[in-house]
Amino acid sequence: MLESPSTVSLPSAKSQNLKVRSFSVILLAGLPSFLLVLAAARPLDSAGGAQDQLPPPLSGRISPYVSTPHRVVEKMLELAGVGPDDTVYDLGSGDGRIVIAAAQKYGARAVGVEIRSELAEQSSKEIARLGLEKSARIIHGDMFEVNPTRATVVTLYQLTEVNKRLRPLLEKTLRPGTRVVSVDFQVLGWDPEKTQIVTSDAGTEYKLFLYVRE
Ligand SMILES: C[S@@+](CC[C@H](N)C(=O)[O-])C[C@H]1O[C@@H](n2cnc3c(N)ncnc32)[C@H](O)[C@@H]1O
């Protein structure tokens, strides 16, 4: 289990394209096409082709980098009722925007886990630039190797297939009452407490799923 200490790409237009192009193709075509989609997505990936640098054992379980628009991030954190007593884990934290928002706007402690070194480094630097090191940090590593048991809120923007693989870890480690908010992709087998549609400033609809662990 990894437990160690912190873009800023702002790819809103690009990421919307990437969202539509990659995630909907993935939905239609399923996991076998996922790696092909990753290759297609790479030119728009503001992480700069970091997939190339991933060790082979990880390459089959890495979602593409697509950032959640800031407005949607706020709605996610509001849906989970995040406040100063919370510890938020963003599994696959990208440019760190959820971690940063949770710490900066909602006063929570926040931990991001990001496999791509550029994004982990970039988001750590942003956390330092904003002076949020006491409440926010990024773990550079594989979310499947992290123990998020301290989380009171977990945020996810991963493919359904990846959520499916994460589910045993979440069920094993999360404490009762922990809220899990997933963007666009369900955690199959769990019943959402609430769902919410949020429209980004660019006019794209995102579906949020709120789960509460029993
Ligand atoms: C769709 S993006 C979401 C980024 C961010 N959470 C957001 O909402 O803006 C998914 C992120 O998960 C990261 N990721 C994928 N698989 C991972 C893994 N096994 N461990 C850690 N990060 C992972 C990707 O590099 C990417 O940055």
Image: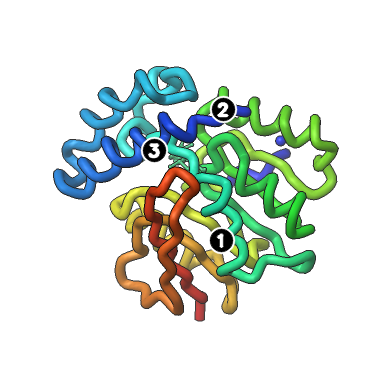
Above or below: residue 78 compared with residue 155: below
User: 154 or 196, which lies in front?
Assistant: 196
Of helix, strand and loop, which one carries label 2?
loop
Look at 58% across and 35% down and name the residue there. 95
How many marks on residues?
A: 3
Crowd band around label 1 with a 10 angstrom C-alpha radius: few (<14), some (14–19), many (20+) = some
Residue 196, percent across and down? 43, 68
User: 197 or 148, which lies in front?
Assistant: 197
Distance in Å between CA atoms under marks 1 and 2: 21 Å
Above or below: residue 87 compared with residue 64: below
Residue 59, percent across and down? 34, 31
- Residue placed under numbered mark 1 in the picture: 75
Residue 116, percent across and down? 51, 29
Q: Quadrant of residue 78?
A: bottom right
104 relative to 97 in the view: left or right = right
Look at 74% across and 59% down and name the residue there. 106
Crowd band around label 2 with a 10 angstrom C-alpha radius: few (<14), some (14–19), many (20+) = some
- Residue placed under numbered mark 3 in the picture: 16
Distance in Å between CA atoms under marks 1 and 3: 17 Å
Q: What amino acid type is highlighted by mark number 2?
A: Ser
Above or below: residue 211 compared with residue 170: below
Q: What amino acid type is highlighted by mark number 1?
A: Lys
Of helix, strand and loop, which one carries label 3?
helix
